[in-house]
Image (tube, rainbow, N blue to C red):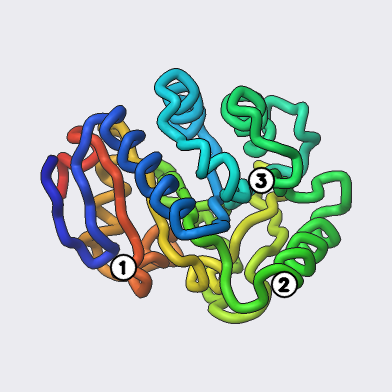
């Protein structure tokens, strides 16, 4: 493993399975300290992590007891849909590990987008008024988007306000997502980045001129001390 310190946080260069083991270790370490909240992400890499975690039994019994599970962003579709991020977490991880229903916190997608975001924010505020997730897991898009904050997203300049919001992604429909203000309140952030196709985006986020409107992943730069990028060699090849 090699480690690089960048303006967007520490990049650890690992194989995919080493990245999964590091993520599991971080989640287990949180659970050892007491009840904790973990927000998962959508995409093919998290789905592969779910299969790996189930096969290896990498998450401890204490983790299954102490961790509340969320997703950092969600499509406005039923949980049964193949497009649902939390639905994939249920089917790939939570059901297989027997995580109880009281530890599962999907976005209330049965509501209209704005109402769903407001309900999620209100529920979160009752339980944790001054912080967001203890650990937020993100991916990085080829266009450098994180969560549902895409290039030119109107949420990018909003550093205050609700931690959880609804936004309409042009051509992709309504999304529910953690906001910039929410990211700032997370205890730690881990970004999983795999594949040569992500190398230009990771370089732009970590080393490029600061332009978060076009490279949203750069929004993590002010939080660099709390951000860890788990990247494979192809993804980190341009750093």
> Residue at the spot x=45%, y=66% of the render?
187
Mark 3 Cα-neighbour bin, 10 Å: few <14, some 14–19, many ≥20: many
Q: Residue furthest top?
A: 55
Residue 238, position as x, y percentages in the image: 16, 45
- Which disc is residue 106 wearing? none
Question: Which numbered disc, 2 or 1, marks the residue that appears first in the sequence?
Answer: 2
Q: Quadrant of residue 95?
A: top right
The answer to whether residue 218 is above or below residue 30 is: below
Which secondary structure lies at badge 3?
Answer: strand
Name the residue rendered at 78%, 69% in the picture.
122
Q: Residue at x 44, y 30 (%)?
A: 49
Give the secondary structure at mark 1. helix
Quarter of image, res 101: top right
**Mark 3 sits on what residue?**
74
Residue ID at (81%, 46%) = 109
Residue placed under numbered mark 1 in the picture:
224
Q: Position of residue 78 (x, y in %)?
A: 80, 35
Residue 173 or 75: which is nearer the viewer?
A: 75
Instruction: Tell whether label 1 touches label 2 (CB within 8 Å).
Output: no
Write down the residue under mark 2.
125
Marks 2 and 1, how far apart in space?
25 Å
For the residue carrying disc 2, how many other residues have a C-alpha within 10 Å: few (<14), some (14-19), or many (20+)?
some
Q: CA distance from mark 3 to mark 2?
A: 19 Å
133 lies left or right of 6: right
**In front of the other: 150 or 66:** 66
Closest to the observer, 58 or 69: 58
CB contact under 8 Å: marks 3 and 1: no
Task: Classify residue 220 by image quadrant.
Answer: bottom left
Q: Nearer the viewer, mark 3 or mark 2?
A: 2
Query: Which quarter shows the N terminus?
Result: top left
């Amino acid at each position: 493993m090699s480690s690089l310190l960048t303006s967007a946080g520490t990049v650890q260069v690992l194989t995919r399975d080493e990245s999964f083991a590091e993520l599991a270790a971080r989640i287990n370490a949180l659970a050892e300290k007491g009840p904790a909240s973990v927000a998962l992400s959508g995409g093919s890499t998290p789905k592969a992590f779910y299969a790996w975690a189930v096969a290896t039994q990498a998450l401890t019994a204490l983790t299954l007891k102490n961790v509340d599970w969320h997703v950092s962003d969600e499509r406005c579709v039923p949980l049964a849909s193949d497009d649902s991020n939390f639905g994939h977490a249920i089917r790939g991880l939570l059901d297989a590990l027997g995580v109880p229903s009281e530890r599962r916190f999907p976005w209330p997608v049965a509501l209209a987008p704005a109402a769903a975001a407001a309900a999620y924010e209100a529920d979160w505020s009752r339980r944790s008024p001054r912080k967001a997730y203890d650990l937020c897991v993100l991916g990085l898009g080829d266009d450098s988007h994180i969560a549902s904050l895409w290039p030119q997203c109107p949420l990018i300049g909003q550093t205050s306000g609700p931690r959880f919001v609804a936004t309409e992604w042009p051509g992709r429909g309504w999304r529910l997502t953690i906001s910039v203000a929410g990211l700032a309140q997370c205890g730690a952030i881990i970004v999983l980045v795999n594949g040569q196709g992500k190398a230009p985006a990771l370089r732009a986020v970590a080393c490029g001129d600061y332009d978060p409107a076009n490279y949203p992943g750069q929004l993590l730069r002010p939080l660099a001390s709390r951000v860890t990028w788990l990247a494979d060699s192809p993804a980190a090849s341009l750093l």
